[in-house]
Image: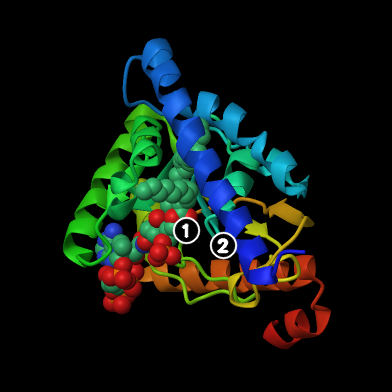
Amino acid sequence: ELSPAVNFALRISFYCLLCVVSSALTAPVCLLVNGGRTVKNMRIIKTVVKTFKYFFGLRFEVKGLENFKVEGPAIIVSNHQSILDMMGLMEVLPDDCVQVGKKELMYTGSVGLIIYLGGVIFINRKSTTSAKMVMAEVAKTMTTENVKVWVYPEGTRNCTGDLLPFKKGAFHLAVQAQVPVIPVVYSSFTTFYNPKKNLFTSGKIKVEVLPPIETKGLTSDDVSDLTDRCFRTMRETLFRLSGHPSEAKESS
Ligand SMILES: CCCCCCCC/C=C\CCCCCCCC(=O)SCCNC(=O)CCNC(=O)[C@H](O)C(C)(C)COP(=O)(O)OP(=O)(O)OC[C@H]1O[C@@H](n2cnc3c(N)ncnc32)[C@H](O)[C@@H]1OP(=O)(O)O
Ligand SMILES: CCCCCCCCCCCCCC(=O)OC[C@@H](O)COP(=O)(O)O
């Protein structure tokens, strides 16, 4: 019998190794098929990553996929719990959707390469000014290139079973481009994954894609309200999906 700490370390190491090896194998395929950095590579990446769940006994129960079917671009916002989220992301990711990620991800070897090839937009979280400039650029190109953008508005991983306060970048982006915000909520991982308790077992993750929130006619003055509204809806959904109905009641 392995100690829980060793067992946890082995499972996480295996996950990272799986990511590194699959990225190294998938990168040449992306280059051969699509020739370079493009969101089209995400279709290939998605196909590979969607097999990972079987190695860890994870199951996804997805609802509301029809809410992704909006004409044209949109901002998708979701909660961010762990590096494991990448599997949940690929499980539901619509076509032609790029993600916003921290620039440090570029320096993770083959994983950085695959993320680059997939068209991920890198931001420097330590510099609000440069991050805002990148996001403003994205607001322009998402309309011309007709892509959706996936942002984790908490801005960092958070495995507490609750949401961190939202950063406003995603909502500024939506208002600037006048495109809808589509919230996606993943149930809490705490019952099967907790690094502090060396817990990483099999488990079920409920995913819900919520109805789009329109931003037509909103201005930068409305960004705070839009952020709050989105936060409250997502928090209620998180508690409901994770089976904490009392907390959901408290926050409403
Ligand atoms: C084949 C096998 C492969 C296996 C391997 C795997 C491959 C997988 C492939 C692909 C998967 C890719 C997965 C990627 C995942 C990445 C996850 C991450 O990295 S998450 C971290 C980074 N993401 C974010 O941080 C986003 C969200 N952040 C923001 O949007 C922030 O708002 C940001 C950075 C722009 C600024 O952050 P602030 O910390 O300064 O905080 P604030 O409160 O939001 O802003 C400060 C002030 O600036 C204004 N502001 C913000 N944005 C503005 C804007 N665009 N225009 C005008 N004002 C703006 C705000 O309103 C606020 O002002 P007032 O307090 O309201 O007065
Ligand atoms: C040197 C090789 C290391 C390779 C490790 C591969 C691990 C797989 C990583 C999958 C990409 C998932 C992206 C992700 O979840 O990034 C974390 C950031 O969102 C938030 O950063 P943070 O919580 O603020 O540190």
Quadrant in which residue 200 is drawn: bottom right
Looking at the image, what colour scheme do you see?
Answer: rainbow
Residue 93 at x, y = what percent? 58, 39
**Which percent across, then down, holds residue 100?**
38, 49
Label 1 neighbour load within 10 Å: few <14, some 14-19, many 20+: many
The residue carrying mark 1 has its beta carbon less than 8 Å from ligand 1? yes
- Whether residue 10 is visible, yes or no, is yes
Q: Kindly identify which residue carries mark 2.
A: 79
- Residue placed furthest toward the front: 1
Figure quadrant of the C terminus: bottom right
Q: What residue type is labelled 2?
A: Asn
User: How many residues crowd mark 2 within 10 Å: few (<14), some (14–19), many (20+)?
Assistant: many
Where does the image place residue 197, in percent across and percent down from the top left? 65, 77
Q: Look at 74% across and 65% down and name the residue there.
A: 192
Task: Give SS at disc 1.
Answer: loop
Is 94 or 52 nearer to us in this picture? Answer: 52
Find numbered disc 2 in the image and state the secondary structure of the residue it sits on. loop
- What residue would you read off at disc 1? 152
Number of numbered tags placed on the structure image = 2
Residue type beneath disc 1: Tyr
Report if residue 151 is visible in the image.
no
